[in-house]
């Protein structure tokens, strides 16, 4: 997950991987269709996305040695843990639509799947709180400063031990060696855009 628009990220990756054609999709549904209709040599996405499409993570991105990142629960209301099942949430669509409420329940550490409003870009999370379409949103901790800086609203932020999400990973279909070599040579600023600092 990245704050960059799909085309901007596509250009940055493609420029850093000469000879490799790169296509970045902004929607999970478009990504799934492309994988099924015209399978690429490799696919890169957050690990939950690959898992939801029944793809294995052949190469895992790491950040400070961890393969997952902390998500924060951000709200304009004073939330307590016993309220979590009854709150409406906003989140990026990391898994298929039907599976998203259960996925969010897992992040919250609750058994009952809550109401979930999905968006395709991190910038679409703030309006959910501004227009009260959601009571809270879940977003990566690394986006906290940028998120808060774009609004004068006062936020309550919870960091739950269960709210860990797998970082970007790669599944290979063909031509693994060439593409893996190119991925491992990506400059640090491009890796940072992907939310990782190395591959395992």
Image (cartoon, rainbow, N blue to C red):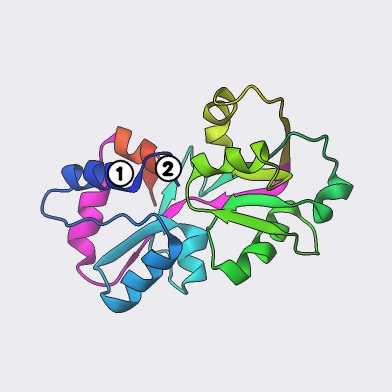
At which x and y percent is residue 127? 59, 39
For the residue carrying disc 1, how many other residues have a C-alpha within 10 Å: few (<14), some (14-19), or many (20+)? many
**Most extreme residue toward the left, as rendered?**
19
Q: Does the CB distance between marks 1 and 2 fall below 8 Å?
A: yes
Mark number, residue 192:
none
Mark number, residue 2:
2
At which x and y percent is residue 57? 42, 64
Residue pictured at 28% horizontal, 72% vertical? 173
Report if residue 140 is visible in the image: no
Figure quadrant of residue 136: top right
At which x and y percent is residue 20? 16, 56
Residue pictured at 24% horizontal, 41% vertical? 12
Whether residue 68 appears in magenta in the rendering, the answer is no
Q: Is residue 22 left or right of residue 53?
A: left
Callout 1 secondary element? helix
What segment is highlighted magenta in the picture?
A: 160-188
Label 1 to label 2, Cα distance in Å?
A: 8 Å
Q: Is residue 106 left or right of residue 187?
A: right
Q: Earlier in the sequence, mark 1 or mark 2?
A: 2
Mark number, residue 9:
1
In front here: 185 or 97?
Answer: 97
């Amino acid at each position: 997950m990245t704050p960059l628009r799909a085309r901007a990220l596509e250009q940055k990756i493609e420029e850093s991987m000469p000879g490799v054609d790169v296509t970045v999709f902004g929607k999970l549904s478009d990504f799934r269709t492309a994988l099924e209709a015209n399978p690429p040599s490799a696919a890169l996405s957050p690990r939950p996305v690959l898992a939801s499409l029944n793809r294995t993570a052949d190469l895992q991105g790491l950040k400070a040695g961890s393969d997952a990142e902390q998500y924060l629960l951000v709200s304009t209301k004073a939330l307590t843990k016993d309220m979590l099942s009854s709150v409406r949430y906003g989140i990026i669509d990391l898994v298929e639509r039907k599976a998203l409420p259960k996925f969010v329940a897992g992040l919250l550490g609750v058994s009952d799947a809550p109401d979930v409003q999905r968006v395709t870009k991190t910038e679409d999370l703030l309006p959910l709180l501004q227009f009260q379409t959601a009571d809270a949103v879940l977003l990566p901790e690394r986006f906290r400063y940028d998120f808060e800086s774009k609004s004068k609203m006062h936020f309550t932020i919870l960091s739950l031990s269960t709210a860990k999400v797998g970082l970007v990973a790669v599944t290979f279909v063909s031509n693994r060696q060439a593409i893996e070599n190119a991925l491992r040579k990506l400059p640090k600023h491009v890796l940072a855009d992907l939310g990782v600092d190395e591959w395992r």
